[in-house]
């Protein structure tokens, strides 16, 4: 009888130990999964990052290039590639609304300008937050550059966020931006557009 009771007690203890170990494994597994998810949203410096891709279309609704935007500590890095464009310099800007209705892309609104400044880096009262450098297109119709702008953010809670309620658009213009003429640097027609939301 005593041997039976002893065996029952031992079985009970082993069952409790197994449950405890199983719970510990489940908790550890949850922590590992949570850490992996966090790692997807962090860079090597353990800071939360944001990355967006913008697909550009021309007035005929054909592919005209793309841009990758990445939130960095001091602003947003813009990696832009264009194709099928006339050689020369073309103005590039963020516009205030995530709408790219062809053929003129006027639906994108004015330049992104939350601080109500004037256009252009050479303007004493500028620039617009959405002003970017010109892109140089080569004889084969392609061009690319990387540039970091401190005037915008991909963080939704910032006043200068490109991801506000109505999003924004990246627009390439027909002519070179002169960097000073308000409101658009005398950069001509909008020839390519991509939404950011």
Image: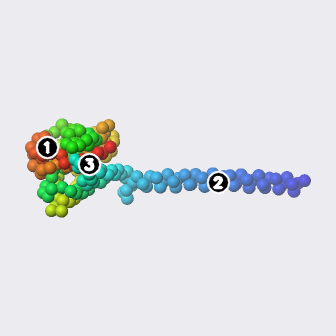
Quadrant including the C terminus: top left
In depth, the one of 184 and 42 nearer the eye is 184
Within-10-Å neighbours for mark 1: few <14, some 14–19, many 20+: many
In depth, the one of 30 and 192 nearer the eye is 192
Label 3 to label 1: alpha-carbon separation: 23 Å
Which image quarter: residue 157?
A: top left
In this figure, which residue is indicated by the disc labeled 3?
A: 61
Q: Is residue 77 visible?
A: no
Q: Residue furthest front?
A: 60
- Residue at the spot 16% in from the left edge and 39% down from the top edge: 117
Name the mark on residue 194.
Answer: none
**Does residue 140 appear to the left or right of 30 in the view shown?**
left
Q: Secondary structure at mark 1?
A: loop
Q: Is residue 10 visible?
A: yes
In this figure, which residue is indicated by the disc labeled 2?
A: 22
Label 1 to label 2: alpha-carbon separation: 64 Å
Q: Position of residue 48 (x, y in %)?
A: 37, 51
In depth, the one of 155 and 137 nearer the eye is 137
Between circles 3 and 1, the one closer to the viewer is 3
Which image quarter: residue 102?
A: top left
- Residue at the spot 25% in from the left edge and 41% down from the top edge: 101
Which image quarter: residue 146?
A: bottom left
Q: Position of residue 192 (x, y in %)?
A: 22, 49
Q: Which sits earlier in the primary sequence, circle 2 or circle 3? A: 2
Between circles 1 and 2, the one closer to the viewer is 1
Q: Secondary structure at mark 2?
A: helix
In this figure, which residue is indicated by the disc labeled 1?
A: 184
Q: Residue furthest right?
A: 1
Q: Secondary structure at mark 3?
A: loop
Between circles 2 and 3, the one closer to the viewer is 3
């Amino acid at each position: 009888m005593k041997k039976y009771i002893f065996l029952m007690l031992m079985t009970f203890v082993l069952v409790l130990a197994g449950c405890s170990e199983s719970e510990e494994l489940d908790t550890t597994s949850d922590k590992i999964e949570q850490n992996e998810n966090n790692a997807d949203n962090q860079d090597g410096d353990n800071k939360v990052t944001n990355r967006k891709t913008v697909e550009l279309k021309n007035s005929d609704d054909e592919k005209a290039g793309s841009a990758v935007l990445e939130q960095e500590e001091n602003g947003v890095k813009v990696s832009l590639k264009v194709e099928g464009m006339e050689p020369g310099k073309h103005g590039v800007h963020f516009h205030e609304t995530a709408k790219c209705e062809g053929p003129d892309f006027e639906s994108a609104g004015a330049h992104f300008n939350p601080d109500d400044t004037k256009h252009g880096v050479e303007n004493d009262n500028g620039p617009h937050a959405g002003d970017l450098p010109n892109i140089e297109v080569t004889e084969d119709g392609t061009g690319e550059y990387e540039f970091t702008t401190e005037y915008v953010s991909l963080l939704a809670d910032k006043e200068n966020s490109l991801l506000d309620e109505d999003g924004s658009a990246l627009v390439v213009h027909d002519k070179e931006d002169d960097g000073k003429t308000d409101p658009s640097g005398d950069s001509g027609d909008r020839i390519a557009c991509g939404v950011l939301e």
